[in-house]
Image (cartoon, helix red, strand yellow):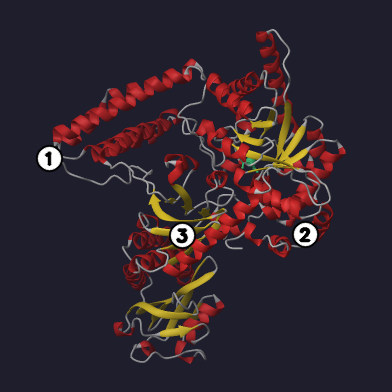
Amino acid sequence: MASMIHRLQRIVQEVNRAPDIDRALVLITESLTQDLNTDACSIFLAREDDPEAFVLQACSGLNPDIIGRVERRLGQGLIGTIAERAEAMNLVDAPRHKKFLLVPDSGEVDFPIMLGVPIIAHRNVLGVISVQRVENAFNEDEEAYLTTLAAQLATSIERAESQGRFSTKQATTHMIKGVAGAPGMAIGVAMVLNRGVTFESVPDKKTSDIDGELQSFKEAVRKVCEELMLQADKMRDSLPEEECALFLAYAQMLSSGSLIDDTEQGIKQGNWAPSSWRDTVEQHAYVFAQMEDRYLAERANDIRDLGLRVLRKLMLEQSVYLDFPDQTILVGDEVTATDLADVPIDCLSGVVSAHGSSSSHVAILAHALGIPAVMGVPNLPVKQLDGVDLVIDGYNGSAFINPSKSILDEYHQYLREEAAIEKDLLVIKNQAAVTSDGLQVSLLVNSGLMSDFTPSLRSGAEGVGLYRTEIPFQIRDRFPSEEEQFLIYKDVLETFRGMPVVLRTLDVGGDKPLSYFPIAEANPFLGWRGVRITLDHPEIFVTQVRAMIRANVGVDNLEILLPMISGKGELDESLVLIHRVRNEIEEELGQKIVFPKIGAMIEVPSAVYQIEDICALVDFVSIGSNDLTQYLLAVDRNNENVADLYSSLHPAVLKAMRQVVEGAMRSDTPVSVCGELAGDPLGVMALLGMGIDSLSMSVGSLLRAKKVIMSFSYEELTELLQLALAMSDASMIRDMYAGKLDQRGLGGLIRAGK
Ligand code: PEP
Ligand code: MG
């Protein structure tokens, strides 16, 4: 068993390292011939232009001249039959099978024993691997081995094929398909962020300038030590002294001892500083990792972490300054929210990320900035895209690499049409969001960046329905102090003076990490997240709530929202802390203050079923449709493999939201929605139909949502919701609402072109 796993691992690794698909296929046939002791082996792959035609791409033990010349259609011959049935065939006398088709000149008749298995990735049959022998039927173990291998190789083959196709046809248009991340379109130039300096990415290099390398190494260490001391200083405002001491200990660990000596030794032997440092760090980390004592073993991570800091300093000095093209489309394996912040906002036109989906935070941020995003693109040839022309369509999640003139013309036309729609929408900017039969809807914005304040005010928002406080936390390298937070919150409260501003307490964990507060968990979305963290760290929670309440003095428009509430207990505990802060501040000021409204996010299924208990404790609830969808459907909001299953218009999600509305109405508690659904024109139709009259969304969606509201009556939306709730799946519901939107001539609100 062990040897089978090792053999499999070896082949998969070799194939993944192969420079191109042809070499990968040769490797597979060679390994199979050896491992399964076969006399012949062949691999057929589907044609790019016709997925029902399978062409022989590699073989061993057969006449090599037939490579590229034998083709089988779906259902034709044994290969076509395996592809059609999508299952293995194990035959002792292949030529006697009724589907057998002889390939002239192949030498095949000599090998009557045949085992063939399909190669399937993402439900598509990519090809067929077949092995043949003169004698000895393939046993069950061999069949299991080949099936496992084909399943493991499928994604590698898919990736190698896609990258190969791309690189061999550089100048031709290549369409890629992911999922819609944030709406809009862009024509621009791909820019692959060189964020990922890792130990693995450091090449070995020799140097003749030993003094120069020693110098830059010392300089890098000095800078990191300086940063660590500064961090310790800054942390004193927000963390207890013991935790600050950690930074000093790091600085000490760095500036003396064998880490430095060993690296200098390596440089003196002629290695450049980055690889010498890499080797030293890896050796030291390894020694710690092997230690029995858990505490000491964990120090391996500290060493790697410190190591990376120094490495980044070293590598940055060796790399060139990034020049951003005017129409930058940020491309990466996993573009993050903070990557967006690295690009000057005037240059940023779009985002394409191999991983993630519309509810990833980077997509939400792109949406807030009015920038299209295409997420979850399988096999995105990231490394080959830097500087390449791109057209991206964030409505349907597609993009074109090296777009042809006709595609460029088409998208220029769409962009003109979109500009016309935007212009039309401006007409309603100062009008109230009221349905044709008089239901008044409050439209608020989701925020977290200073940069969206002005556009939010300009687009007629009636306040901030969700301020994600984690964003100012994420862009720092330590917890912001109470004073820093006070200034940030004061700014937003003042900017929207006279309108409600909902500040959400820190919602980190899940896919929102803090670089300075690492959390390693097997299931982060089901783990330490949101209010669970802040209740375990009351010092963080209390500092934040103090900053919020102090900032509200004299402005009096603050509302506090608690994320990830999964039970009444968390609310009770949060409320105790919030009241304690209020008392403290009143005592400090010697005066009574206006106590903010407190709300709970409904984004965990348990909260749906406890809605009445929750409403009894709070002033309002806000439905977080992003997380509620993820938790109800058991679909990771960032996982592109299951992105097709993620839909906030799923009947189960709509039913849960209706249950929340009904529960809240019974106790007269206002309900709003602040997930992405609230800004999706189809979502607006569904939510209004439930009687929800307060929606908070990305500023870019505001006028579109208003247009939808003004184009329908509440009565008809109630009827449409009944129809939707009777449907069995999300796509039927989506089509039904999209059809209604089209009938009103509003299709351009949800797709490219009018
Ligand atoms: C949500 O879950 O719907 C929500 C608004 O919160 P976030 O997207 O920040 O998790
Ligand atoms: Mg959430």
Q: Which residue is mark 2?
A: 724
Query: Seen from this angle, which residue lies furthest top?
Result: 590
Q: Earlier in the sequence, mark 3 or mark 1?
A: 1
Question: Are there few (<14), some (14-19), or many (20+) residues within 10 Å of tag 1?
Answer: few
Is residue 712 rendered to the left or right of residue 151?
A: right
| Residue count near mark 3 (Cα–Cα under 10 Å), binned few <14, some 14–19, many ≥20 | many
| Residue type marked 3 | Val
Image coordinates of residue 56 in percent, x first then y, are 39, 80
Q: Mark 2 Cα within 10 Å, few/some/many (few <14, many 20+)?
A: many
Residue 79 locus on image (x, y percent):
47, 82
Toward which corner of the image does residue 652 lie, by quadrant?
Answer: bottom right
Residue 391 numbered tag:
3
Quadrant of the rendering where the C terminus is positioned: bottom right
The correct choice, above or below, for 644 with respect to 548 in the image is: below
According to the picture, the residue beneath numbered tag 1 turns out to be 208
Amino acid at pointer 2: Ala
Answer yes or no: is residue 409 visible.
Answer: yes
Q: Earlier in the sequence, mark 2 or mark 3?
A: 3
> Mark 3 CB in 8 Å range of ligand 1?
no
On screen, residue 254 above or below 563? above
Residue 16 image-quadrant placement: bottom left
